[in-house]
Structure formats: C-alpha cells, structure tokens
Image (spheres, helix red, strand yellow):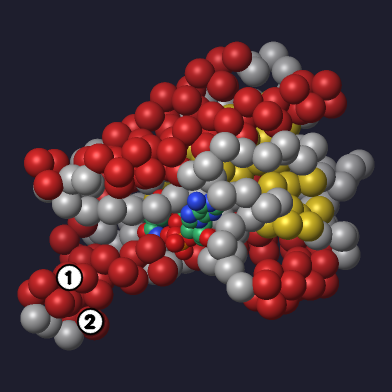
C-alpha cells in the first residue's frame, strides 16, 4: 500500500537506528516509502537495517550520514521529513551543565530547523510535503530536572506552528507528535537511573514511572506512533497542520 495511490514517497527519519525513529521507519517502509535512515550505530547494524527497509518497502533505502549536534551536510530530496532524533539529560537547573544545555538544544531543536530549512524548497517545488516533528508531552507540560529537554520541546512546537503557517497553501503540512512514555533506550536509561537512586528493582522503577504520570498505566508502542505518522502523511490529514498531538495515555489531560 502506498500513502498516496499515484506516487512513491521518499521519507527521511532522523535518529532512526533505534526506538521511535526505527519504529516509524519500519511503518513507513511497510507503506512502500523509500526510506532514508539516520542516526548512530555500528556499520553492520546499519547494513542490516537498510536491508530490512528494502525488504519491507520494495524500494532502495539509504543512509544520511549526519551528526545532528554538528553542522549538517547537504540534505537529500525528501517528501516526508520526520524530525525524531533527540537526547535527554537530567539535572536540577543550577547543576545543569552548559555543555549539555547546548547539546540538547542543538539535537532536539536546532537540528529540526536546519533539516526543515534544507528540505522545504524541494517540497515547495513539488507542491507536496509532510513534516512531522517528534516533540513530547514535555512540549506541553514540564517535569523537574529536564530544563533543556522541556525548553527544546516547547520550542519545537513553536517551530511547528510557524512552518505550518508559512506552508499553509502549498500542499505541505507540518505537525508535532507529543508522546508520553515509550519504552525505548532513552527511557530505559531513566528507569535504570531511578532504580539505582531509590535502590529498588528495575521492574518496580518502571511501574512507578508509569503510575506517576501516565494514567493508562502502559507505554505507548512505537507501532502506534508509526500508525499516526502514516495517517498524517495520508489524504485524510491533508488539511491538518500546525497541531501538537499527544499520544500519552491521558498524561496531559490531568
Ligand atoms: P532513542 O535514544 O531510542 O533514539 C534516539 C535516536 O536519535 C537514535 O537513533 C540515535 O542514534 C539518534 N541520535 C542521537 N543523537 C544523535 C545525533 N547527534 N545525530 C544523529 N542522530 C542522533 O530515543 P527515543 O525514545 O526513540 O526518542 C526519539 C524521539 O522521541 C526523541 O526526540 C525523544 O525526545 C522523543 N520522545 C521519546 C519519548 C519516550 O518515552 N521514549 C517520549 C516523548 C518523546
């Protein structure tokens, strides 16, 4: 199945060697998109992922070599841009290292500006584009010890709105997805740190993490986020732009 009946779309998903980005890449590949991966990982793992994407999509897949904390190399031509790469760092504000503040802002916010800046001209020329920014519930509300992450994700929602306004009559949409807890390497680190800090088993730390914020009491699955991306790329979402969609088991309803 193709996202649109006429054309095979090319999708770049940043940070797609693990977690949510990989889940989204798999789901888009299953719809027949040409996939461009990006992120860190061993050479063999990257080769395996490219082969998997080609098998799923029936299209050639490629890797965009870019460390999003650095100046970006030229961007490939894409129809779908998913700004997913992100890192977390936790510390009270007064102990937050300025280096980590800069790094979180670069990867979680500035990189999205640069990829959009690079991809928009091609989308405009083709009269079609989908930009999807992986923000977070932390784009909508705050939690302690996440100053840089919360600031970056709130900023990403602002960027999403501006791009939506500027592209409103161009066949391009720009939306943000705001997940609550999703069990990926990024969150596993936080669960393990919590287990150590409270001297409790990892399973207990995981349950407490969910109970504290996410009323559904379960993690959002990467496949659920992939399905939302496919919807946002499909014809039913052609006039849906500038929104921030929480997928958080009612976290932000509280
Ligand atoms: P993850 O750690 O599993 O994946 C992060 C990806 O980003 C990896 O592929 C990694 O290689 C890549 N990456 C990191 N630094 C990079 C850099 N400098 N250049 C290029 N790639 C880089 O994390 P995840 O949980 O899948 O997070 C994906 C996105 O979803 C992030 O933006 C995160 O903030 C957001 N998010 C995650 C959760 C959650 O609960 N996991 C919740 C809300 C939002």
Query: From the viewer's perspective, is 181 left or right of 44?
Result: left
Residue of label 1: 194
Secondary structure beneath disc 1?
A: helix
Residue shown at the point (47%, 33%) measured from the top left? 110
- Looking at the figure, which quarter contains the C terminus? top left
- Looking at the figure, which quarter contains the N terminus? bottom right
Q: Quadrant of residue 120?
A: top right
State the image coordinates of residue 159 (x, y, percent, origin top left): 47, 25
Secondary structure beneath disc 2?
A: helix
Image mark for residue 202 = 2
State the image coordinates of residue 202 (x, y, percent, origin top left): 22, 81
The residue carrying mark 1 has its beta carbon less than 8 Å from ligand 1 = no
State the image coordinates of residue 95 (x, y, percent, origin top left): 12, 47
Query: Between residues 64 and 53, which one lies in front from this camera angle?
Result: 64
Query: From the viewer's perspective, is 21 left or right of 65?
Result: left
**Alpha-carbon span between mark 1 and mark 2:** 8 Å
Q: Residues within 10 Å of mark 2 (few under 14, many from 20)?
A: some
**Image vertical order of residue 170 relative to residue 85, above or below:** above
**Image vertical order of residue 132 relative to residue 190, above or below:** above
In contact (CB < 8 Å): disc 1 and disc 2? no
Query: From the viewer's perspective, is 72 left or right of 160?
Result: right
Residue 168 shows in the view: yes
**Image vertical order of residue 247 relative to residue 236, above or below:** below
Residue shown at the point (30%, 46%) measured from the top left? 100
**Image vertical order of residue 169 relative to residue 63, above or below:** above
Residue shown at the point (81%, 59%) measured from the top left? 61
Q: Quadrant of residue 235?
A: top right
State the image coordinates of residue 58 (x, y, percent, origin top left): 88, 65
Residue shown at the point (38%, 44%) measured from the top left? 103
* Residue at the outermost bottom position: 201
Task: Mark 1 or mark 2: name the one nearer the start of the chain.
Answer: 1
């Amino acid at each position: 199945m193709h996202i649109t009946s006429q054309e095979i779309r090319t999708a770049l998903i940043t940070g797609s060697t693990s977690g949510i980005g990989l889940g989204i890449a798999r789901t888009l590949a299953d719809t027949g998109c040409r996939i461009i991966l990006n992120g860190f990982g061993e050479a063999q793992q990257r080769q395996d992922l490219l082969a998997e994407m080609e098998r799923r999509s029936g299209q050639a897949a490629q890797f965009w070599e870019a460390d999003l904390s650095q100046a970006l190399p030229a961007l490939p031509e894409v129809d779908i841009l998913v700004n997913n790469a992100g890192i977390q760092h936790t510390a009270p504000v007064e102990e937050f290292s300025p280096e980590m503040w800069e790094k979180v802002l670069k990867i979680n916010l500035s990189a999205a500006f640069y990829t959009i800046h690079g991809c928009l001209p091609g989308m405009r020329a083709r009269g079609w584009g989908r930009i999807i920014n992986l923000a977070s519930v932390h784009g909508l509300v705050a939690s302690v010890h996440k100053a840089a992450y919360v600031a970056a994700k709130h900023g990403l929602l602002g960027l999403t709105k501006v791009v939506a306004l500027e592209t409103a009559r161009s066949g391009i949409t720009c939306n943000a997805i705001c997940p609550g807890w999703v069990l990926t390497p990024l969150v596993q680190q936080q669960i393990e740190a919590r287990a150590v800090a409270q001297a409790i088993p990892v399973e207990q730390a995981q349950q407490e993490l969910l109970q504290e914020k996410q009323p559904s009491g379960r993690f959002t699955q990467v496949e659920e986020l992939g399905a939302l991306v496919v919807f946002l790329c499909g014809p039913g979402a052609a006039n849906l732009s500038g929104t921030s969609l929480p997928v958080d088991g009612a976290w932000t309803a509280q």
